[in-house]
Each structure stands twice: as C-alpha cells, then as structure tokens.
Image (spheres, grey):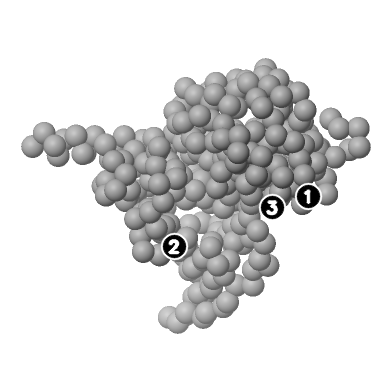
Amino acid sequence: MSTDNRLKCGVAGVGYLGQHHARIYNELPQCELVGVHDTDEDRAREIADQHGCRVFGSLEELTHSCDAASVAVPTDHHRDVAVPLLEAGCHLLGEKPICNGLDEAAEILDAANRGDCIVQVGHIEHYNPVMAFLEERVTAPRYITADRLAPFNPRGTEVGVVLDLMIHDIGVILQLVRSPMIDIRSIGVSVLSGLEDIANARLEFESGCVANLNVSRVSEKKVREIRVFQSNNYLSLDFMNQKGHLLLRDGLALQREEIPIEKGEPLKLELLHFADCVLNREAPKVGGAFGMRALEIAIQITEQIREAERKALQQ
C-alpha cells in the first residue's frame, strides 16, 4: 500500500467507461491515479495527459505500480486482464458482467483467493441513490417490473443485450428478492448486432414474487425504471433521473408521495466504495460471488433465447 496512505490506482481500458474511472480516481482524495493502460496507445496517452498520470505499456507495469485497478476492457477480455492483476496482488474493480462464462468467472475468483485480493464487480445501480431507497423500503415484494432501454451503440455488442444491459436489473432483483429462484422464462430477438438486441425475462421466486425484465438496445430513447408492488404499497423509481414516487394504500384509495432522493453520481459512489473496501480490507457490497451469480442467471436467460431461436430456424 502507498506510504502516503492514498490508494495507488490504475485503469486497464480507457474507452467509453474506463475514461470515467480514470477521471474519478483522479478526483477522489483517498486515491492517486498512477496511470492507465490501453491497447490503443494514442487513446491511453490522451487520457493520461488529461489527468497528469503515466501510460503503462503493459499490464505488468500496471501491477508493479498500483495497489488497485479498474478493468474496463471489453467483456470477452475480462479474464485475460483480471487474472494476471489479481495474481500479482492488485485489488480489482471489474466492469459488469464479471466475464463471459462461469468457468472464466471461477478463474477470476480463484486468482483473487491466491492473491488475497478484493474483487468488486461494477453493478453500478447498486450504488445509485435510488437503490438505497429500494433496499430500505422493499421488504416483501410480490411483483417487480424493470425496463432498461437504450439507443443502439456498437460498443458492447461482443455480448447480447442480456449480458450488456439486463444483467444490471438481474443484480437489482437478486438484491431485493431474498428468495431462491425457481423458474426462468425468456424470449429475445436480434435486430442489428447479430446477437439478441431485445429481450424479456420472467423470473419466479420461491416466495411467490415474480419479476418481469424488459431490455432493448435498439430503442429511440433511454429508460432505466423499476416498479415494485407490495401488499400495502407500490414504488415507481427512475434510476437514470434519480426520482420516483410511492403509492400507499389507504383503504380503497392510494395516497401518492414523492420520494426525496439525494442525487449522486453512481460511478463515483461505486469507486469510492471500492477504495474504502481496499483501504479498510472490507468485503464489497457487490463482490465476485454475487457477480458470478448474476452472470449465471444471465447465461441461463441467454441460452433459453438462443435455443428458441435454433428451434424456430429448424421449423
């Protein structure tokens, strides 16, 4: 650990997401942004110049200089970047999903154990102030709907929309519904990318709760909303705009209350949590095991969609 008590941080991959990791590490008083690494050296130099840090020519250089690192490379490269960092003793914040497959996820967790390192997975909505309200007020959910829509962007299309977008809501549902899952039913279609771009999943839990998840990455507008129905109230919240309302049952009527949410940048709150966990040697809110469980469900949904597609082509 750094002798000046600041956490020496690096970023592997400084594209669309990684650039913001670099910016925030440079802003956090408990962190020192030591440097960045990217296969695109010009991009790495651009980001490094913005923040006055080094460009690492290799992952090995990063591991020798940093206590902790964000991995914001494409999903299909997560394992190849994460494992060497962890084996060298570098604590890790990896963007979601933790990786492409369960075997790769297990390799990451094994490497973390060997290196005695913390792994946090970037399920960013868990650090959204909206989530804090949900965790406080959701006690016995009966029905949940989540909608996550985005315009098409070629970035992220190395995976389907379930691993790209729906996994956010899978993580949220797992956190809110503390009950074993007993059934998954899903559908999806490809529109532009060659993989599923629109998907729906219905998750049923032993408690009787049902969650219905809708995602699209070919929408005309951005939407990140969730609605939770309980026996005596209904919550409707907007993750993107960080606002919402609560409907309370009053006899046969419903009383509406606006929800006071103190707004904050979720990514900054996420990186602050990661830094605090590393500095204090505490388990993160969204650790590797949680990320692997969310990935497992996302893979089941994806496999259902693709099996249905194969059957349709055979008819």
**Closer to us: mark 3 or mark 1?**
1
Quarter-of-image position of residue 223: bottom left
Say which residue appears at 44% left-offset and 45% top-offset.
Answer: 155
Q: Which mark is residue 222?
A: 2
Say which residue appears at 47% left-offset and 79% top-offset.
Answer: 254
Q: Which of marks 1 and 2 is nearer the N terminus?
A: 1
Indicate the amino acid at tag 2: Lys
Between residue 165 and residue 262, name the one nearer to us.
165
Query: In the picture shown, does residue 180 fall above or below 202?
Result: above
Which quadrant of the rendered structure holds the N terminus? top right
Q: In this view, does 214 lie to the left or right of 240?
A: left
Between residue 76 and residue 141, name the one nearer to us.
76
Q: Can residue 122 be seen in this view?
A: no
- Residue 263: x and y, percent? 66, 66
Say which residue appears at 44% left-offset and 62% top-offset.
Answer: 222
Residues marked 3 and 1 touching at CB (< 8 Å): no
* Mark 1, residue position: 28
Q: Is residue 24 left or right of residue 186?
A: right
Q: Residue 38 carries which label?
A: none
- Residue 309: x and y, percent? 21, 39
Neighbours of disc 2 within 10 Å: few (<14), some (14-19), many (20+): some
Q: Which of marks 3 and 1 is nearer the N terminus?
A: 1
* Mark 3, residue position: 269
Indicate the amino acid at tag 1: Leu
